[in-house]
Structure formats: structure tokens, C-alpha cells
Image (cartoon, coloured by chain):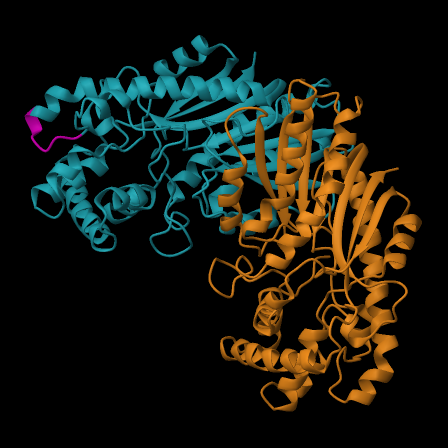
Chain colours: A cyan, B orange
Amino acid sequence: MASKQMVHMNQGQGETSYAHNSSFQSAEQNRMKPLIDAAVVELCSNTTTMSHGKMVIADLGCSCGPNAVALVSIALEATRSHFLRLRQPHPEVCVLLNDLPYNDFNTVVKSLVAVRQIGEPLVVTGIVPGSFYERLFPSGSVHLFCSSNSLHWLSKAPEDLRINQIPAYDIDENVRRERLPVVAGAYARQFRKDFTLFLQLRGQELVPEGRMVVSLPGRRSDEPVTESSLIWGTAAQILGAMASEGVIDKERLDSLYIPVHGPSDEELREIIQEEGSFSISEMRVHDPISGMDRALLTPNRMVNSLRAAFEPIIVQHFGSPGEIMDEFVRTGEEHLSLQRRSQVKHARNPRVMLVVSLTKA
Amino acid sequence: MASKQMVHMNQGQGETSYAHNSSFQSAEQNRMKPLIDAAVVELCSNTTTMSHGKMVIADLGCSCGPNAVALVSIALEATRSHFLRLRQPHPEVCVLLNDLPYNDFNTVVKSLVAVRQIGEPLVVTGIVPGSFYERLFPSGSVHLFCSSNSLHWLSKAPEDLRINQIPAYDIDENVRRERLPVVAGAYARQFRKDFTLFLQLRGQELVPEGRMVVSLPGRRSDEPVTESSLIWGTAAQILGAMASEGVIDKERLDSLYIPVHGPSDEELREIIQEEGSFSISEMRVHDPISGMDRALLTPNRMVNSLRAAFEPIIVQHFGSPGEIMDEFVRTGEEHLSLQRRSQVKHARNPRVMLVVSLTKA
């Protein structure tokens, strides 16, 4: 079920690591705080849910680096404050982090140790390796699921495209433009299938009235699908430029499908309602770079973020590590600088972040 | 609470790794099989324990390499067979592996993936990093604890020795012999303290009537304590020879305390009875090398086993990686070859393995 592609972030703690290139993801996690806080307060106030004096909090797709424990730390702090405010004894809290088996868990374990602290409440921690498109936790065992910037990763590349050998990105601009609806449609269908399964599985694993707060990149429903609203669009554009320059093989590029999809808010709402395990408590749509210092969003930083996320897939596909990624960064910086100059200042960002807070129906 | 010494096995998969030097430990795990099988059958037949259709199995001190999943695999297979025999639906099984945060968990995760298989029963897996001298799991959540060859690791070096600066191993043979009761006594007291705490903590984490099957190296109660019945004895002898030859600093050796203790069977029984959380269902004492091909127990293999277990501690203490361990292997082989020639053939092994099966009282 899990993707055969190497979908994990760049490992370790070096300059090109995900750990050093994920400040954007960190800002996003902070934006989830009010929704996590509200979900925790509701959970803690529910006498049925809390009848066993235990609270199990799990992050799905934790990745590695400092962000790995950010969401569970927010939830842990909210739990602490709630019981402190009520002067009631704290429940035991169990904090679990999930990611694919290729993730750098040795780094994650070191962050987890910091989360466990002596004193109230008793916090026990664990790691649950595996795809979130499979069962990961015992039935009815989790109170709160969180996930930030992970659910856009599909279980695999869109089947229709792969089977029919339709390239996701064609170097010819006209072919690409004409084919956009077919490509975007195939990605949307794969996402629908995957996200439906995800909801079913998490529904089984949550306690009755359990909660889930997730955030993922997507687009506004009232904006049309364009090449640059696709999550993998920019990376594909850079690789396209590299293929045009003969740095990578054109035919190899034709068979590359980066398995990510950002749904529209309407698309997300529809899938959740159709699947039926959850009711939507709140949904927010926001510009991920609003409030950020745009001067910091340099082409260099942006392309390094793309590198941290997609390097394992790119290197696995083109099979020539080292040089290819240096070239990716060089071409990427050029491409993003050009794009920036040609854009109207402060144009509406084609990509947004969707945050949704769900309650098990 | 956890030891500040680097108590983890040699990492990775190379020639000096624990993964490649743990066949002895593997034989020991197989010897635990009948006791684990019996404990699982009793647990599965207990309608109170199994009322939620879930079974949580945890290994404490899993280390890395192929042995990491051996005990939980035995327990999983026993559970499968039991319900298959009765033609009853399988419970969900949750398999958890614990070790200290410095353990090589990236290797463990790869072994865990193999344990999870599609089909009946549903198996979910996780890693719980931390010292087993701290709380690791939620209260009343675990059905079966297993542990092989880990509980001889103390939480720290014996306090009395460290505070009073009494060397555990003195190069002078007469001093060493005279001081043996003091040194052995200090190790025994630290073990009593640690193992009592261990029993208390696991008692809290087990479900009512939960089970624990553990195996650890020790000695027969009817044999006196000698230098070579101490678990760290051989490693200390090798380091002593290295200090005599001037390869390592004599004074540094004086402050080295390898934090392991092998209790006698009586010592173990007494601690368990005094602590009171458990009743002993069965205790076995056996020669760890009985049934093994003695020809395979070459000095080279034996010293490589010691290296895989103690290298992190030795290197951390003497602070000169690389050369020191090559010298350790060279001196060790010489020492063990000499020892072997001087020994009466098939002399009684001063060290035994203790296996104990416990039921939560």
C-alpha cells in the first residue's frame, strides 16, 4: 500500500537537511495552535473520553528535525494548562510520533527525550513507523491526531497517469497546457482515494468523540487549477529546465510522478462528508506566507525547501546523486528569480494552507 | 535516573556491530521460547485480560540487529497459534520495542516493518525510547513484557564505589582479590535498588494478571563470587592487561565502572519476593553455552562479542577511539587463548543464564 518511492525528507542535521529547511512548516504549525488548543479543551472536558485518566496524542508524518515534536508539544501544553486551571489531577499523557520507516528516527528520538519531563503529568513517548495509509494504532486507542504538511503526500503516483504513460510534466508548453486537466484530475482522484482511506483508518483508531486537527497545502476552490497551483509544479518546472538544458534525461523526466496533491477546500470538505466518519468542527483557509517577512523568502531558501522535501525522490528517479541536486539548486534559483521579477508585486498566492479540525462522528 | 554512560550496543550493520556479534544472545532467546509460549497461552485464556480484544507485547532493551524482534516474534506467533487452534477471532496485537535513546533505532524500524504483515491478526508496532528504570508505558496498558540479556545493565555505576573512589578493577592481583567482596557487594546493592525499581514500574504498566518473561546473565547461588563470575570481569581483565602494557592509562582504568551486574538465582528470587508486585511462575538456571558447538566459541568471537557490548563505554571513558579497540581485540584474543589452555576441559561455566517467568500479583 505504501508508496515504493522514497517519500521521506532529507535526513540528518546538515545544511541540506529537512531539519534546517523547514521554518515555513514551523510557522504553519503555530497557526494550528488555536484549533489544537480548542480540541484539547473539548476532549479534556468530556468525561466519557477521559474516564480512564489517559490521553493519547499522535502526530502523523512527524518527519525529523525540531518540527517533529511541535504539534504534540502544543497539545501537551494545552492539556497541562487545562488541568492546572481546573486544579484537577493531570491524566497520563502518551505522545506518539509517526512517519514512514525511511524517516530519520534516530534524530526524532533525541527530540522526544526533551518532551518527556519529570513531574506532572506523566508523559510516555513512542514512535510508530509506517504509512498512514495503513492501520498504525490499536482500535479506539487515540484521543487526538495531529498532522501538519504531510497529508498531501499520496500513497503512490496517480494510477491513471502511470498506467497510460501520460507524463505529469511535458517539456512542450502547449502539450503541457492542454493536458493539465487530465493530469490534475488524475492527481485529484488518487488523493480522494487515499484521503478516504486515511479517514476510515483514523476513525477506527480514535476513541469515541476523538479529535483530529490536520493542515495541508492546497488551493482555494474559487481559483482555477494552474500549473503553479500544483504542489509539485515548481519542482517540475525546475527539472523541466534541466531537461531542456540536457542536464537530465528528457525521457526519464516523462516517467517522474511526484506523489503529492494539494486539494481545494471544497474538495476536502466533500471527501470528509462523503466518507462519513467525521464531522467538520472548523475549516480555515489561509495564505501560508501572509504575516511572513517576504524578504526572507529568497529564491535560495525556497529552492532549498524544495530540495529538502523532494531530493530523495529526484535522486532515486534519476539515479545520479550529488551533482543533480547542485544543478537543481542552481537552476531553481535562476528560475525563481526570473519568476519573481515577472510577477506582479503581492499577487495572490496560488497556493494556500487548509487547516481542518474534525470530530469523530 | 538513566545512566550517563553510553550504554548501547555497537551500532549499524558492520563487522564490529552488535547485529553481527550477537548469535549467543539469539540462542538465549530461543531458550526463552517455552516460557513465553506458556505465558501467552495463559494470557489468551484469561477472559478478563483479553476482554478488549487487544494484546500489547513489549520487549525491554531490544537493542538492534536481527535479535531486536526475536522475542516479540515468538510471542506474536504463540498468540497466532493459540487463536487458530481455538478457531476464535484473533485479537489486535500491538508490538512495542524499547531501548535507550542512543540505540540505533533506524535499524530497528527496518526489522519492525517485517513483523507487521497484512492479514490476521492486525499487528501494529512501535518504538518506546527510554530507560527501563523510568516509566515507559501508560498504566495498565501492557499484557506481556519480555527482556533478554538487558536487565544486567544497571542504571548507573555502583554509588559506593564511585563515591569512595574504590576501583572496580585493580591491576595489583592481591589488592583486587582482597577487595572482591567489597566490589561485588556494591554491584549487588546497586542491582537490588535498580531491579526493585524496575519491578515497581513494570507492575504499574501491566494489566491485571499481566506477565513478564525475562532472561539475564548471572551465577549459581551455590558457587562463590569469583573475578570471572562477574559479568564485566573478562573485559576488565583485558583492560588491565592493556594498562600493564602501558597502552591505556592506569589511573583512568581505576575510575572505570562498567555498569552491569549478574545476580545469583537466590538474589533474584529474594528481590522479586521482597518487592511484591509479582509472583514467580517459573525460574530456570542454565549454562548459556550448553548445547552450543564449543569449537565456535573462539577467542576471536568471544572478544568481538565483548567489543560489541562494551565499546561505547570503553571509548567514552578512555577518549581515544579507533586504536584502543583494535588493541582491546588483540589483547583479548591473547588473554582468552591463554585462559582456554590453562582451563580444565569442560570446567563448569562460572556464569549462567537466569530465566524467570512472572505473573503480576
Q: Position of residue B159 (x, y in %)?
A: 80, 69
Q: Residue at x 58, y 57 (%)?
A: B102
Task: Tell me if A214 is positioned left or right of B213 in this view.
Answer: left
Q: Can residue B283 be spotted in the picture?
A: yes
Q: Can residue B256 be spotted in the picture?
A: no
Q: Position of residue A58 (x, y in %)?
A: 56, 32
Q: Which residue is drawn at 73% across and 49% down?
A: B134
Q: Quadrant of the C terminus of chain B?
A: top right
- Main structural element of the magenta stretch: helix, strand or loop? loop
Q: Position of residue A183 (x, y in %)?
A: 21, 22
Q: Which residue is drawn at 43% across and 28% down?
A: A215
Q: In which quarter of the image is the N terminus of chain B?
A: bottom right
- Residue nearer the viewer, B96 or A140: B96
Q: Is residue B214 above or below residue A92?
A: below
Q: Quadrant of residue B357?
A: top right
Q: In this view, does B179 lie above or below A348?
A: below
Q: What stretch is highlighted in magenta?
A: A169-174
Numbered circles on residues, count: 0
Q: In this view, does A270 lie above or below B320?
A: above
Question: Residue placed farthest to the front in the image?
Answer: B345
Task: Tell me if B42 is positioned left or right of A23 in this view.
Answer: right
Q: In which quarter of the image is residue B342?
A: bottom right
Q: Where is residue B226 in the image (x, y as percent from the top left)?
A: 82, 75
Q: Quadrant of residue B189?
A: bottom right
Task: Tell me if A267 is positioned left or right of B103 in this view.
Answer: left
Magenta region includes residue A75: no
- Residue nearer the viewer, A168 or B92: B92
